[in-house]
Amino acid sequence: MPLVMKTLREAAAEVGIPEAELKAMVDLKKVRAILKRGQPLFAPDELAKIKRLRKTVPESAKPVVAAAPSVAPKPVTARPSVPKRPPPSRRIGPQQ
């Protein structure tokens, strides 16, 4: 029995990403797709792989939906920077 292939619109809705992003992933060869009449078709196993990889994205890379109000951090008191002196020039060889 042949696999039920999904169109770009169906695949984007199933995975939960914009169609343009999914198309870009195909163009960059990050995702396998079959082109039929110029339209990409996606296999169910490929969509499962995309879902699995998107779950493993670190929390720092995910967009923040709503940040909880928190206590404002204390301002860091910066010490005034002291310019460093260049080392004294030393001459090599006979001195004049």
Image (cartoon, rainbow, N blue to C red):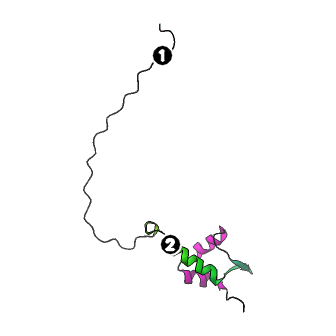
Q: Is residue 8 magenta?
A: yes
Q: Nearer the viewer, residue 53 or 31?
A: 53
Q: Residue 34 location, x and y as percent?
A: 71, 78
Q: Residue furthest top?
A: 96
Residue at point 63%, 69% (across, down): 30
Q: Quadrant of residue 10?
A: bottom right
Q: Is residue 70 above or below residue 3?
A: above
Kind of element beneath mark 1:
loop
Determine which residue is flagged by label 1: 91
Q: Residue furthest right?
A: 37
Q: Residue 18 location, x and y as percent?
A: 55, 76
Q: Is residue 69 left or right of residue 84?
A: left
Q: Quadrant of residue 3?
A: bottom right
Q: Is residue 38 left or right of residue 71?
A: right
Q: Is residue 81 left or right of residue 64?
A: left
Q: CA distance from mark 2 to mark 1?
A: 60 Å
Determine which residue is flagged by label 2: 56
Q: Is residue 29 above or below residue 49?
A: above
Residue at point 31%, 72% (across, down): 68
Q: What range is drawn magenta here?
A: 1-30
- Nearer the N terminus, badge 2 or badge 1? 2
* Amino acid type for the residue under numbered disc 1: Arg
Which label belongs to residue 70? none
Q: Is residue 71 left or right of residue 86?
A: left
Kind of element beneath mark 2:
loop
CB of mark 2 within 8 Å of CB of mark 1?
no
Q: Is residue 18 magenta?
A: yes
* Amino acid type for the residue under numbered disc 2: Thr
